[in-house]
Image: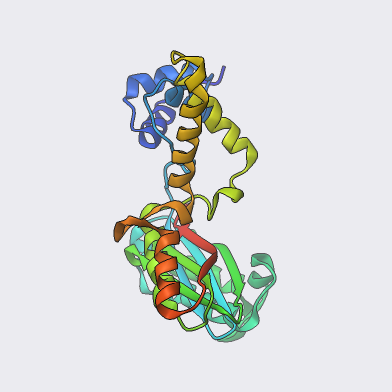
Amino acid sequence: MREITSDMIKELRERSGVGMGKCKEALVLAEGDMEKAIDILRKSGLAAAVKKEGRETKEGMIQTADDRSTLVIAEANAETDFVAKNDRFKHFLYDCVKQALETKPKSLSDFLLQPYFKDKSITIDQYRNLVIQALGENIQLKRLEIVHKHPNCSYGIYSHMGGKLVVVVEMEGASDQEGIAKEIAMHVAAENPDYLKPEEIPAHVLAREEEIARSQVQDKPANIVDKIVAGKLKAYTDQVCLVHQKYVKDNSVTIQQFLDVCSKKLEKKFSIRCFWRWKVGQ
């Protein structure tokens, strides 16, 4: 069996909200498997749904840049928050998104090999190494995404906590309604949906939720178990799917209902195509 360390117990405590003693017991029963331990806590009713992300230890910043046809999202990491707030670190990331917006690289690895636009004698990766030497910490460009804009879509961008959390929402129906798309992006930042709509939830995830739900109602009469499980599954999908979540600024309506109101008011049909929710260290 894998050794149960204090760090593992602490991580499970942070992810589940359950006491240290119960977390240790769950980890022992799960033989050190974190996800199995979470299931054990949930089946026992001690923990509700738990996010898959564990502790976030990396520092850094997320930056966006866009023009009429393209949007770039990039994350750079440093070892400490002190360096992540340094102007040189910020300038490095800003230069990266500015160049990526122009060159539209196919991948992060391709981008790192590009000549740096301010000094073509060095590559982006060599520029990164110069920043490392200047700041005395390991600096990494962790991820980079190029979004090609659709002509009938609006893009809402919301940055929170000084660039530690950034959300981009792609809304179909008009190309000039960034304000509505940003309202949705602010909601995504606050409520952290896992999926856009129920159809996107993988079958194995639903099967896991059904198994947990059934384990919680074993003492109920057989004729109502299926109804209770169906209700629990609906509550789960409402919680994790963006269009079914209660709008954070008005919990009397869901996000889909909020979009329907906007559609009726502006006489356009709005729908969310996709969203990106990046948090430093994920």
Residue 249 shows up from this direction:
yes
The percent position of residue 204, horizontal first and vertical second, equals 63, 36
Q: Residue furthest front?
A: 223
Residue 89 in the figure: left or right of residue 222: left
- Depth check: give the residue in front, 47 or 60: 47
The percent position of residue 49, horizontal first and vertical second, equals 43, 36
- Res 149 quadrant in image: bottom right
The percent position of residue 279, horizontal first and vertical second, equals 44, 57
Color style of the picture: rainbow
Q: Which quadrant: the N terminus?
A: top right
The percent position of residue 55, horizontal first and vertical second, equals 42, 42
> Residue at the spot x=67%, y=67% of the render?
107
Instruction: Tally the numbered discs.
Output: 0
> Residue at the spot x=59%, y=85% of the render?
117
Residue 137 shows up from this direction:
no
- Depth check: give the residue in front, 86 or 266: 266
- Res 121 quadrant in image: bottom right
- Res 248 quadrant in image: bottom left
Work out whether 28 lies above or below 56.
above
> Residue at the spot x=38%, y=53% of the render?
191
- Depth check: give the residue in front, 245 or 94: 245
- Depth check: give the residue in front, 258 or 74: 258
> Residue at the spot x=51%, y=18% of the render?
223
Work out whether 249 lies above or below 178.
above
